[in-house]
Image (tube, rainbow, N blue to C red):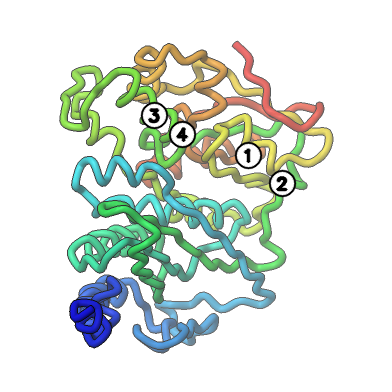
Amino acid sequence: MENQSDERRSSLSYKTAGLDLDVYEQTLAGMAPFLRRTHTPRVLDGFGGFASLFSLDYNTRLFARNYRHPVLVSCTDGVGSKLKIASLMGKHDTVGIDLVAMSVNDCLCTGGEPVLFLDYLAMPKDDPALTRDLIKGISDGCMEADCALVGGETAILPDFYQPGDYDMAGFCVGIVERDHIINGRAIQPGDAVLGLASTGLHSNGYSLVRKVVFDHAGLKVGEFVSELGRTVGEELLEPTRIYVRAIKNILRHYPVKRRVVRGLAHITGEGLEGNVPRVLPPGRRVFIRKGSWPFPPVFGWLQRLGGIEEAEMYRVFNMGIGFVVIAGRYYADSIIRQLEEDRVRTFVIGEVREGEPGVEFVA
């Protein structure tokens, strides 16, 4: 009875429940520099308020992005089970790039430019070092996407996550002029389908990847694979390519965009056959020529390692093409030259014909 009375008299606190507010303040302080370095004068309020303020109009030549008929573009996504690879590697400063890429590349598909980004991090206990690494990656991605990281949320949930686990989600807001929206409706038979090279797996198919690599083949993240020229973990943690600057440069080059760039697709889960049809109007079908671009070694390695059928590979993975531009054939060579000036290898991988919307692979 005396022990029970002592327990009743003992003081409970937020800290004993799993959240130390002093450590939480350290975490927030560690984030601030990574947010501020992404800000332009269009971010009006800095960091730390209840909400963030962003000006659409800014009267200076350097930051001239004034709009006549602005339309907001909104996107959200996560990283998925690629985070498990980061945990196995003990390396968490690149998955934030993946987080940004998954949303800003989607935003591009409207013809819009991403302008601001917010994140949501959830973990079982406050970990300033881990949070710093995650936010650094997000900040790096935002710098690459010319996008301001204006805030976010860090949720400490001791009863929801096991030690060592965490999750993250991202939210992007972009803007596009109403007259410059790219929605695929202008796609015509004879248009060229251009494939922009991926950096590998990007952030898709990792449930299958982990099954093949770790469960089926029994490999460890630190094992060197001569076929890949690096370790298993280094290959699987390669960040998703951010296509923002390259695509924005193309769109700026052509004043009447819909006559030149007619459709844009980010190749994520379900590969080319699942994502390209999302921008096709009725009566338009895309024919993609197998062998018209080189596969990064990781795809052949995975296929052999797991005995995966070719159709399943194309259905799950990007197979080396992370983004697709559908454009008038006359402009294809010029667009390819511009993209390669931005160091994005690009290939003519197919064409548009009449037919039921979808993708068909041809030899």
Residue 312 drawn at (x, y percent): 54, 20
Q: Residue at x 30, y 74 (%)?
A: 17
Given contact means CB atoms under 8 Å apart, are the residues at marks 2 and 1 in contact? yes
* Mark 3, residue position: 209
How many marks the image carries: the answer is: 4
Quadrant position of the C terminus in the picture: top right
> Which is closer to the viewer, label 4 or label 1?
4
* Mark 1, residue position: 326
Residue 66's disc number: none
Determine the CA span between mark 3 and mark 4: 6 Å
Determine the CA span between mark 2 and mark 3: 32 Å
* Mark 4, residue position: 205
> Which is closer to the viewer, label 4 or label 2?
4
Residue 275 can be seen, yes or no: yes
User: Mark 1 packing: few (<14 Cα in 10 Å), some, or many (20+)?
Assistant: many
Question: Which of the two discs, 4 and 2, labels the residue nearer the N terminus?
Answer: 2
Amino acid type, residue under disc 3 in the picture: Val
